[in-house]
Image (spheres, rainbow, N blue to C red):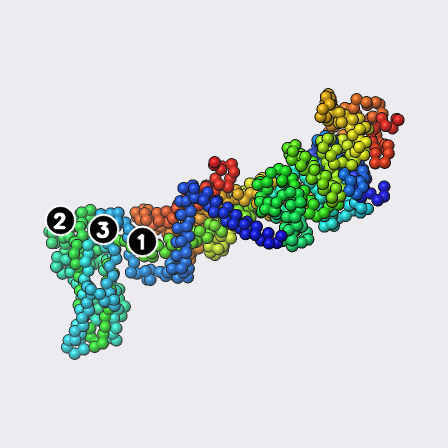
Amino acid sequence: MEFWIQGSELKVVKLELHKIRQSFKQLIVYKSALIGLLIILALISISIYTIIALPYGKAVELWKAGEKYWLDNPRNALPSWVNVFSSRKLPETITLSTEIPRAGISKVIIPAIGKLNVIRIEFSFNYEYDDFPSELNLFFRSKFNISSPHLTIHWIKPDGEDIVLKTLVISKEENYYISVDYGLAYDLKNRISQKLSKPIEYGMPIVVSLFVVEDDSALNPDTVKVMKGVYKLWIEGTTFETDTDLDAKLNVYGKVYGWAGTDHLRRDVGIAILWGTPIALAFGVTASVVIAFMNIILGAVSAWFRGYVDTAIQRITEIFMILPFLPIMVMIATFFRPTLFNLLLAIIALSIFGAGVKTYRAVFLQVREFPYVEAAKAYGAGNFRIIFRYLMPKVLPTLIPSIVLSVPDFVFLEAVLALLGVGDPLIPTWGKIIEDAFRYGALYKGLYYWVLEPSFMLAITSMGFALLGFTLDRIFNPKLKEI
Amino acid sequence: MNGRHLDIKDFVMYYRTSRGEVKAVDNVSFSLNKGETVAVIGESGCGKSSLAKSLIRVLPRNISVYKGTVLLDGLNLMELDEKTFEKEIRWTKITYIPQAALNSLNPVIKIGDQMIEPLVIRNKTSKNKALEMAAKTLRSLGITEEFLYRYPFELSGGMRQRVIIAMSLMVKPELMLLDEPTSSLDVLTQANIMNLMKKIKEELKPSMIFITHDVSLSSELADKIAVMYAGQIVEFNIADKFYHDPAHPYSRKLMESVPTLRMDKNLDYIPGSPPSLLNPPKGCRFRERCPWRFEKCTEDPPLIFLGKDFYVSCWLHARG
């Protein structure tokens, strides 16, 4: 007997596996479900990769690090892959530093009379892009005791033109933001207009005047052309102490960066796109599962016990249904620190007594009258046994698709709340990117990528869950089942 | 009436609706020896199922009156509180096979798990032992053990019915309440189930209350017959005597409506329908449809004992 039962249990396990495989096959028969599943799998892979490659603490630190940390990145740069789709090649950022020696960088210190040294740094780089760089910065770091080095900075264009940018005495850490040197801008503009003997009638930024082809096309901001070729930056100087050392770094900021671009604080938007994925999934799935189950339990309890319990649950539900959701969320965020977890709790708390309670109660009012429930009562099943084992499983088939379908609702909700300023200030999420973009006028400035990237992620997430959900609905809901 | 296995006296169950009180079971009294089967017959809506449900205390929510005495082996079940009843009587001494037995299995639980629910709920045995028992009981009813791991929808109607019967047999009940166990089954399956019940009756000897609207079916199993009309028992009789000579006019008309094989007989029917159980008329409740009615019928008829285990509630018999 026992032996027999063991054998049959093995058979049953096999049968179960077969059933699971069968329903999986059934699922991927529908192309839409296959696409949905692939999207969700991709999102999950991204999440896992993100959590491993860029741990949460590090991501938050990077996101909050401030502009200083990101100083080597261009501001509001497009993602690099736009170059693939455009014949006009946008510049990438070129960073040249004497601390990281490579071809095109040279630093020579020649002892002269007495303690005097002559220092000469040369940066040279090939500029083959069709657009001007966005900024130009020069950073110095030097070691000396009392007497600062005295430097002259030369800019040599590919055609051999030598322009003196500035003569300066530097401190131990000196930044020279070339592109915002307005005096220099004026001088450079005058130089070009003298050369062409024609006035330039627009404010020519330094990034343009340093890289422009100096012919008549430079007179119009729409026709200015980039002079391609090898540019050089010379730093010639005198130091006044024997052991004085000087390092310099030249940043020629481009207009594209990384796979996702950068935002107004030069941060890599990719970090937020990546971290937005696990957060969106966790947030959406948790909220939707918890809320669905709480709704269904409350509906079942309400329908099963009737009487005062029913009245209480239904009245509370009605009160919660008329509460304005968004204003209350904004209010909560004002009073409490809106961490992501608090937001999740608040959303769940506000949705437990949601419309779902009403719907499920209506279903359970029917189910509770089924003969098998009466039979269960007759053989002594208790209230909660009946609720959890007899009533609730009856609606699970419709519950699963609805959970899957409502995941995007909560992903969107998080984004909407972030857009309203109700978001965790620490964690980078898709909603926060959109908020930043919105606040700094991304669309007004034509920085479409800034809005489109998180929007794309939101859309693709909701599409994945929707495709899967609709198909699950078809499989689980007997009324929609095909064949 | 000492030594009776089951003794029901003045059993009353009313429930309240928005339109008034429904007198579903009204002063029902009968008794039963151990191992005997009483068939409760009557038209739809005359309180047969209510009687069974109130005996096992699966009551509607809007119950208003629930009283009387139900002695099972001398123990008054009506005096037990819900907890004791649950522990000692419901589905241990008394089992109930519901009317819609076909739909009485939870569609999302496997047969085996379902069958051991009553035992698991009361922590009687370990799960494995209970499953073993279930397998054994099923086998004795002609179902192989592999069905323990099937879902109810994979079983035929007759099989599901047998599963419910097996569930009931697993606790070795003293009293089985069968609420139309063969309704909505085809004739062959019906015969099959009836034979099974006969076998159970002979071998396990539980007392049974067999509720049916099918007079001919009742003859298969019954030792006693109780005819119910409008919430009351109008005739209680020994089966053999009943089929030959029913005493109450209603029983007589009921017997005349039963078709017989071979004999060419004009099937009779009773015109009209039973009175509403909401405020039933005073006096004999069958009065309106009775061809033998006379003045006296406007008064409530008493129970008239015509012999051992034989009484009738009709003024006609009071006269003679």
Front residue of B131/A199: it is B131
Q: Position of residue A474 (x, y in %)?
A: 48, 39
Q: Say left or right for B29 vs A239.
A: right
Q: CA distance from mark 1 to mark 2?
A: 37 Å
Badges 2 and 3, same chain: yes
Residue beneath disc 1:
A259
Q: Secondary structure at mark 2?
A: helix
The numbered mark at residue A216 is: 2
Q: Quadrant of residue A168?
A: bottom left
Q: Secondary structure at mark 1?
A: loop
The numbered mark at residue A89 is: 3
Q: Say left or right for B203 vs B129.
A: right
Q: CA distance from mark 2 to mark 3?
A: 23 Å
* Residue A104 visible in the current orientation: yes
Q: Earlier in the sequence, mark 1 or mark 3?
A: 3
Front residue of B302/A291: it is B302
Residue type at tag 1:
Trp
Q: Say left or right for A381 vs A287.
A: right
Front residue of B148/A374: it is B148
Residue type at tag 2:
Asp
Residue displayed at 21% across by 71% down: A149
Badges 1 and 2, same chain: yes
Q: Earlier in the sequence, mark 1 or mark 2?
A: 2
Q: Position of residue A349 (x, y in %)?
A: 53, 50
**Protein chain holding label 3:** A
Q: Say left or right for B173 vs B3.
A: left
Residue type at tag 3:
Lys
**Badge nearest the viewer, 1 or 2:** 1
Q: Secondary structure at mark 3?
A: loop
**Badge nearest the viewer, 2 or 3:** 3
Residue displayed at 83% across by 31% down: B312
**Protein chain holding label 2:** A
